[in-house]
Amino acid sequence: MDIKNNIKPISYIKANAAEVLRQVNETRSPIVITQNGESKAVLMDAGSYQEMMDAMAMLKIIAIGEKDIAEGRVSSHEDVKKRLEEKINGI
């Protein structure tokens, strides 16, 4: 994806909203919206946004796990298996 080809001023977005939305949804390429020559927002299709949010959530979970490992908050496979078996058996 070459984002520099998808930079548009807000005046263009206002004048061509339907076409811009069609393009974003068909190509799944985001558009950077500028105002007074500065980047102000990014317009993207809803599916890509959801995928990005899901990926960020997964990265946060991985980061938490890595921090737990670094701080020694870990359990062996055997300990986890034993605890699960105890829960299942009502011990």
Image (tube, helix red, strand yellow):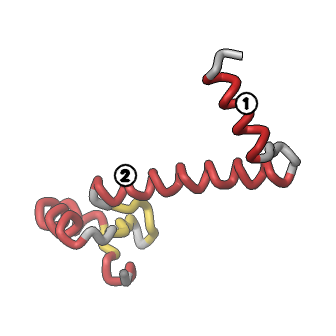
Q: Check disc 1 and give the amino acid type.
A: Arg
Q: Name the residue under label 1.
A: 83
Q: Residue 50 carries which label?
A: 2
Q: Residue furthest top?
A: 90
Q: In which quarter of the image is the C terminus?
A: top right
**Looking at the image, which is closer to me, 20 or 72?**
72
Disc 1, SS: helix
Q: Where is residue 1 in the image (x, y as percent from the top left)?
A: 36, 81
- Residue at screen point 39% across, 57% down: 51
Q: Check disc 2 and give the amino acid type.
A: Gln
Disc 2, SS: helix
Q: Which of marks 2 and 1 is in front?
A: 1
Q: Which of marks 2 and 1 is nearer the N terminus?
A: 2
Cα–Cα span, label 2 and label 1: 36 Å
Name the image quarter holding residue 18.
Answer: bottom left
Local crowd at mark 1 within 10 Å, few (<14), some, or many (≥20)? Answer: few
Q: Residue 49 carries which label?
A: none
- Residue at screen point 20% across, 63% down: 25
- Residue at screen point 70% across, 24% down: 86
Left or right of 74? Residue 86 is left
- Residue at screen point 70% across, 38% down: 81
